[in-house]
Image (spheres, grey):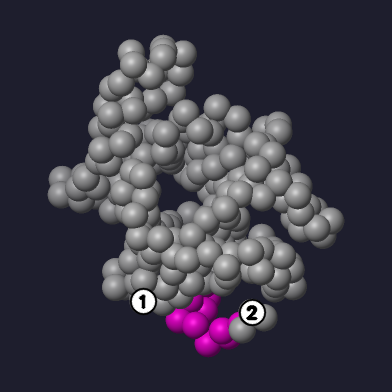
Amino acid sequence: MIILNRCSPIKQILRRCHRQAVESGSIKANLTAYFGKWPENEKQEFRQHMRIIPDFISESEEQQLHEEIEPYMSRLRYEFDHWDDAIHGFRETERKKWFPHNREVLERVRQVAFDGAIMPYVHILDLAPDGVIKPHVDSTRYCGTTISGISLLSDSVMRLVRTDAQRYQQHSADAATEPESKGSEPDAAYRHQPVASLENNFYADLLLPRRSLYIMSHTARYNFTHEILAKEQSEFQGTPVPKTRRISIICRNEP
C-alpha cells in the first residue's frame, strides 16, 4: 500500500511555482531552472521538447499502477551494474498487458505525448532510495524520438546538460541504417557515457513531482545528457527535494 507524504518540502516549491505561474502563465517554465548562458534559439527548442505535466495522474491512479506492478517488482533484487554503467541501484521490467483502468492511463500518455503509436512493451524502472541514474544520452537503436515517463512514489530532480551534439547525435539516416560494425561511432559514444560538464556550459534542472508526466523529445533527447540527481544532490532552486524509492512508467515510440 502506498503511504502518502503530505508534508514534503516539494509542497513549498509547488506553491512557489504556482505563484510564479499566476504571474507568468506557464507552470511548465517554472518547473525548469536554467543555468549558464543559453542561446535563445536553444532555449526555445528545449522548452518545446522537454515538457512536464504535474498531477498527470491522481493519487488513486498512482496506487492502482503501483498495486499492479508491485507483486512482480518486489520479487526482484536491486542491481548495481548496468550494461552501459548508466544506472545503479535499480530493478526493471517490461509489461505489455495491463489492467483496464491502467490501460486508460497509458492511453492518456499516448494521446498527450506521442504523435501516433507507442511501443507495445512499457518499461518499468524501479530506482532504490540510494539509486542513481547517471548522465547519459539515450541510444536511438532502441526507441524513437520521444520518451515519456510517469513518476511514482517520489519527487525527484532531473538534470539535462548540453553535450557535444556532433559526437552523440545518433538520429541521422546513415547511423540508423548502417550495420553495427560500420556504425561504430554512434554506439561507441553511447556506450562510453559523456561527462556532464557544468563548467562553461549551460544546463537545466527539472522538478519532477510525484504523479507528474515528463515528455522528452528531439533536441532534449539528442543534444543533452539526462540524469536523476542522487539524494545527496537532490534540490531544486535551493530547496531540498527528498528522493525516496522512485518508480518510472516509461513509454517510447518506435525507432
Q: Residue at x 53, y 64 (%)?
A: 76
Q: Secondary structure at mark 2?
A: loop
Assign the C terminus to one quadrant of the image: top right
Does residue 86 sit above or below 16 in this rendering? above
Q: Position of residue 168 (x, y in %)?
A: 31, 30
Q: As shown in the figure, which amino acid type bears the numbered disc 1?
A: Pro
- Residue at numbered disc 2: 2
Q: Position of residue 206 (x, y in %)?
A: 42, 58
Q: Secondary structure at mark 1?
A: strand
Q: Is residue 15 magenta?
A: yes
Label of residue 91 in the image: none
Does residue 61 sit above or below 177 in this rendering? below
Q: Looking at this view, is 45 or 231 the one in front?
A: 231
Q: Residue at x 47, y 28 (%)?
A: 141
Look at the image and give the residue range highlighted in magenta.
4-16
Image quadrant of residue 152? Answer: bottom right
